[in-house]
Image (tube, coloured by chain):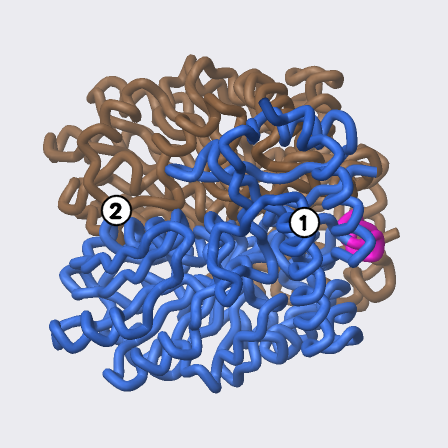
Chain colours: A blue, B brown
Amino acid sequence: MQQLRIPGPTPCPPEVLKAIGRQMINHRGKEFAQIMRDITPKLQQVFQTKNDVFILTGSGTGGMEAAVVNTLSPGDKVLAASCGNFGDRFAEIAEIFGAEVKRLNFEWGKPVDPDAVRQALKADSGIKAVLVTQNETSTGVTNDLKSITAVAKEFDKLILVDAISGLGSIDLPVDAWHCDVVITASQKGWMVPPGLAMVSVSEKAWQAYAKAKMPRYYWDFKLAKDYLEKGQTPATPAVSVFFGLAVALDMMLAEGLSKVFARHAKIAGIARNGAKSMGLSILPEEKYASNTVSAIKASDKLNVSKLLKLLEDEHGVVLAGGQGILSGKIFRIGHLGWVTEKDIKEVMDAIAEVIPQASS
Amino acid sequence: MQQLRIPGPTPCPPEVLKAIGRQMINHRGKEFAQIMRDITPKLQQVFQTKNDVFILTGSGTGGMEAAVVNTLSPGDKVLAASCGNFGDRFAEIAEIFGAEVKRLNFEWGKPVDPDAVRQALKADSGIKAVLVTQNETSTGVTNDLKSITAVAKEFDKLILVDAISGLGSIDLPVDAWHCDVVITASQKGWMVPPGLAMVSVSEKAWQAYAKAKMPRYYWDFKLAKDYLEKGQTPATPAVSVFFGLAVALDMMLAEGLSKVFARHAKIAGIARNGAKSMGLSILPEEKYASNTVSAIKASDKLNVSKLLKLLEDEHGVVLAGGQGILSGKIFRIGHLGWVTEKDIKEVMDAIAEVIPQASS
């Protein structure tokens, strides 16, 4: 069997795959409504929120677009704190839809500095919202979201959080940290195939919605809310992925949220220590190293594409390379969702075995 | 087994469901690229086009939004020819994104009149694009798309076609009829669960793209094209649905397009004749009655919600009611995709059996 250890899609448990392969049902019928009414409060539990939670048919990027277009107007000043590829994407989406984006960029591999966010907000009182990434998949950095959201709260700003690759695997208490819109996606820690983005929407975000003038139809939160009351979605949902999500949520809640987080932390530690024992180093400082994706620096001698090819061809281990400026300089191990200590040990053993061949 | 006969999601063949339940793979790896390169020309075959065809993760409505935002600018004058709920939706999307929409509405149950389109285009040379529905799911009307697109061509207008519930089941030669953007969705005649919208983009649509200023990121056609060259999609795709689509396309092409169309025509005839033999009438004139969805008028004595409930509870037959102004006045049978003569005969027998109980 393949060890698919990229930062999503993640492997799905057999129970989830069985559910995914179920025959179609009426998406406007009683059974589907029951699924919506069953899933939604469970999602709220994992989001640790009383806010509305909507399930949108699309990729996580669609969820990011939804967060932007439902809360902002063209011309709104926005602070985009970015420390990697996905932070940049969030900024780009806001810019394309007409926001005036002030970019606060951090070196790839470093976290977003909450103090720098404070300085930026202090320097410009016209900023309406802060965009930030909880877990930057491109660099394996988990930001200190608690401090960042506290700063945004201090200045009473709207805060939109891309938590796509972290939520459900790394603690993110949405209400306690006053997050206004939080986005995640099914193919990450949720152990479900891609096709759904899940977003939470706070009261403050609804107030922003009421004034927001960016155009929206497919991603419209109000439509999602109106239909959810009927146990439906505005357009035809990805029914199979809903079937899978229902099963996966039960598995997550049966394990218990704190145990899910602890498992991710432990497994990430095995990955990091394994890499270090091979003489490799982790891109971010240990304190900010992500529990869902490890970005490992390649030594000068290590050929990353050769490493990835050998791992896949000879060990069935599928990892990811670096994105953008980190291409060829790092490789990334996804250890989120359906993953055990044994899985990650196998992966690390395979890496240790092929490194000599992949080095010059 | 349930007879799910709504106009989508449609039932999926067991081969498709088996594929849907496959374990995840790397969406940026060789195998997925192979699937993209295998599926895309097969989709072009069914679309009967040499145009680009993209597969977007989202509902059909997302594909409609994509068609609008990739080809138009705010302020562009657009003629929206509508004869039902989905035609109205297309107009609404264009309006929300800032187009100046001239609505050409036809009574629900009647088709779009190509001559009226000609008059409207003649009356206002400023119109840039025509929006039209091939097969109006809400009323069971198939428009004379050949004539409508010929009119648009006569005036050299861009034509955007919502073919969501018709393409793949009803003949629509995209190139021969000069359609610029054509949208369909996986859960219709394609026999696959919902989650993917498929769109074709003509050379003329690309010229429009180059000037179009509506904001777009998630639905951006250029991004889709750039990634398709690598056998990828810009954001993480609904991998499971791709697995299913690959299998379903092979089934469709093995049956042969003209046979698929003929099967739909024959089965639709059985539905219409069956209804007439019960003393019921079809909403649209026979000439425009759709081969994928039959809208059947309820007599004054027939209680539609009672009919639908009895069919589902006692016969496992799931049909759809009317939408909007047709709610309670019609019921709809979806007969598209994975459907046989035997299936539709069972459905008609069940209807005949419950009608007395559902009538007052």
Tell me which secondary structure the magenta stretch mostly adopts: helix
Asked whether residue A261 is drawn in magenta, I would say no
Q: Is residue A117 above or below residue B216?
A: below
Rendered-image quadrant of the C terminus of chain B: bottom right
Q: Residue A277, labelled with which disc?
A: 1
- Seen in the image, is A164 located left or right of residue B7? left
Write the start and end of the magenta stretch as one range: A13-23
- Seen in the image, is A138 located left or right of residue A95? right
Res. B144 in view? no
Name the kind of residue labelled 1 in the image: Ser
Q: Which residue is drawn at 60% across and 36% down?
A: B27
Q: What element carries label 1?
A: helix
The span from disc 2 to disc 1 (Cα, nearest Å) is: 48 Å
What chain letter is assigned to the residue under label 2?
Answer: B
The answer to which of B326 and A173 lies nearer the viewer is A173
Tell me the crowding category of disc 2: few under 14, some 14 to 19, or many 20 or more residues within 10 angstroms, Cα based.
Answer: many
What chain letter is assigned to the residue under label 1?
Answer: A
- Seen in the image, is A194 located left or right of residue B102? right
Res. B138 in view? yes
Q: Dot 2 corresponds to which residue? A: B215
The answer to which of B94 and B278 lies nearer the viewer is B94
Q: In this view, does B280 lie above or below B17?
A: below
Q: Which residue is drawn at 20% across and 47% down?
A: B99
